[in-house]
Amino acid sequence: MPPGVTYLDSSEFVNTAFTLGIAHPAGFPTYSLLAGLFTFLPVGSVAFKVNLFSIFCACLTLAGFYLAARKLLDLFFAEEETSNKVFAALIPSGFLAYSAIFWHHALMAEVYSLHTLFICALVYLLLTWKQCDDLRYLYAASFIYGISAGNHATMAFFLPSILLLFFCWNREKPALRLALCALFFLVGFSVYAYLPARSLAEPSFDWGNPETLDGFVRQITDRDRANSHFDGFQGVSSGAWQTTKFFFYDLVSQLSLAILPGFLFGGYLCFKKSRPFFFFALLIVVVSAAFFARWEKESYPSYLMALWFASLALYWVFEKLANRSPDEAQKNVSPPRNEPGSSARPVRWNQLAVVALFLMIAAAAIKNYYLVEKSGHYFGESLTNKIYLSVPDHAIFAPGLSWFQYYYAQDVMRLRDDVVGINTYTLLANQPAELVTPRRFPTLDLPDPEKYKFDSHESVSDHTQEIFDRNLDRHPIVLEQDSVLFERTKITQNLSPYKNALVRYSKEPALPSNLEARRVLDEFMALLAEERKHPGYLRDLHRSKLTSHFIHGFHFYFHDRGFLAEERVILSLMRKVLEIDGPEQTFFEIENRVLDGKIAAAEKIFLEMQTRFPDDYYRHLAEGILRREKGDSESALKLFTKAAALEPENYQPRLESALAWNLLGNRKRTREEWRAAFDRMKNLRQWGAIQKTRDALGLEE
């Protein structure tokens, strides 16, 4: 287990557990409250204690999975105790325990260990209700279902399955019992009242401002990202096929190859024994797999259902290998014995199968230990804390992707109490005035929100710039290198390199020197070199994602400000460190040389590009730019036309065509192509490039 925080959500959940803040949609109130209890333990750091909560939940999950599997076997087969039932329930829990994804999330502050625990508890209670015909278990399951939705909103996908099971297994007073179930569910679901109540107290980590009705609904439904939730499911037929392939691949990669046939055969056995439970599980698998396809992991409801099916399959196989029918136990028929007079002991194939499967589990544990071991790593602190400590005193700081780590450093570690933090994504929200309020930021001079319609990126950018201008006399303002910031604001020209991964804002356009740019780049390179020495750096995708975020920010900033030598260093990092080696990356390298007047070097890179990506959009665009720079504008125009045909909504082929037509002296076509580029711009960074070209061409306003 890591002794501190890892990147991204880990530091967020440590923060919201310790300060009782509000996490990203759907808010996760159950997690924040329960993990918050662990912060009172008299041992270790706050991050250590919240990480420990995940381990605690993961261990309970494995116990809960085993108990639910035993309950399922008792329902479908004989109720007498046999060692085959023990192993049939235990082995799938072993595959779950030592799968890389479950083990990884068990070691860090994340909601998934608690999520799986709730699923196991819910299934166990429903099976016990069926077995004992005791309504107390049904109502307990309803309460658990309600409170589990406060931990992970995808529990909503269970509702059709639960209703199916209820109406198939309940034979008396369905309306009354369903109403009581709804009541117990609402008692559990009332944990969401935490969100508006806590938001009114203005914690520093207050995602979505759910104290208003609109903010509350937006938060619990994740409305802003609702259209992306099923991105992996495109169309009914193709989406179903793609989701099925993803799910089968996911079972093999995340659990084991042995689980796939176990899932299929166990599903067949479940269909024969209990169609209600079969369709209960199948509905959960289908919806969860479709939802999590875009994440490429973390489909825990699907994993658990597949493993319970595998338990049924294993029991059937073990009984067959023990030379008896799995249903004989229900008839109290003993397995056949050796013939009288025979001294040979039979080969116990079921025991050999158990040993083989346990060896597979041990192999998975050995293999995945390397992937998950983080006991000496301070992933979320080693790089970001150095950046935060370099922020000037009493500054306004706008972190980008590292804002989770910043609020952890500020609220939990109390590193920079003098700094006012407003993350970039709050400043660039659709309605930033709802989030940047005098109540949340009482020390800042904020603009009148009535001046802004917030109907465009430009309006939001102007609001951000006014916040900075109003407070600059009293607070230095620094921001992280952030590609999103450069795409969605007009302040790039007001930023100058400050330190490591930071830029500093000024009211007037800044005129930094190449010496300043190089100094800051060298500082960042030194930090990166130190960071890459740490064990486990290359294994942790979140860690490299943050580094990637800084590098892409540097690329945009250096390119847009004309620091071409420094941009080449960043492009080299993108290729060597981030292992980006596609046509777009190659185009950036060619474009950089052309802008710097190094045509021969650009042509050398293009020769390789022509071989590797002969029909790619960026290949035609790059060749067109090279032809134009060599004076062959007519050939360049044909290449820009090919590029525009491949990506008709991209602005750049039109903008490059405008430059070519201008060289040919055709002002009418120059204006037409420039206007076509203007109509295709998607963000303010593109707007800046288009306006710069307009000025160079001498076109009217």
Image (cartoon, rainbow, N blue to C red):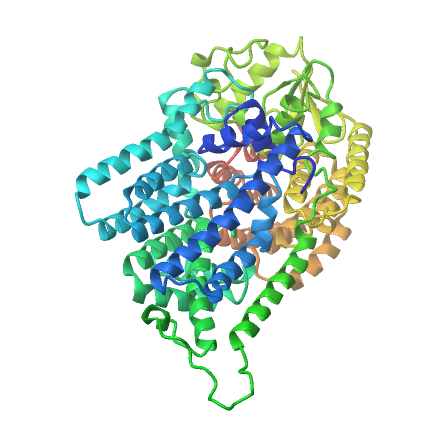
Against 104, residue 482 (above or below) is above
Q: Which residue extends farthest front?
A: 341
**Is residue 94 toward the left or the right of residue 495 in the image?**
left
**Is residue 80 toward the left or the right of residue 458 in the image?**
left
**Is residue 267 toward the left or the right of residue 415 in the image?**
left
Of 25 and 483, the residue lying toward us: 25
Of 658 and 514, the residue lying toward us: 514
Residue 544 falls in which quadrant of the image? Answer: top right
Is residue 8 visible in the rendered image? The answer is no
Q: Quadrant of the N terminus?
A: top right
Q: Which residue extends farthest bottom?
A: 341
**Residue at the image point whose x is 48% and y is 85% from the top:** 338
**Residue at the image point whose x is 73% and y is 42% from the top:** 570
Residue 407 falls in which quadrant of the image? Answer: top right
Is residue 375 visible in the rendered image? The answer is yes
> Residue 661 at x, y = what percent?
56, 44
Q: How many marks?
A: 0
Of 687 and 658, the residue lying toward us: 687
**Residue at the image point whose x is 60% and y is 50% from the top:** 103
> Residue 133 at x, y = what percent?
27, 49
Of 667 and 144, the residue lying toward us: 144
Against 669, residue 307 (above or below) is below
> Residue 234 at x, y = what percent?
39, 53
**Is residue 466 toward the left or the right of residue 409 in the image?**
left
> Residue 374 at x, y = what percent?
70, 45
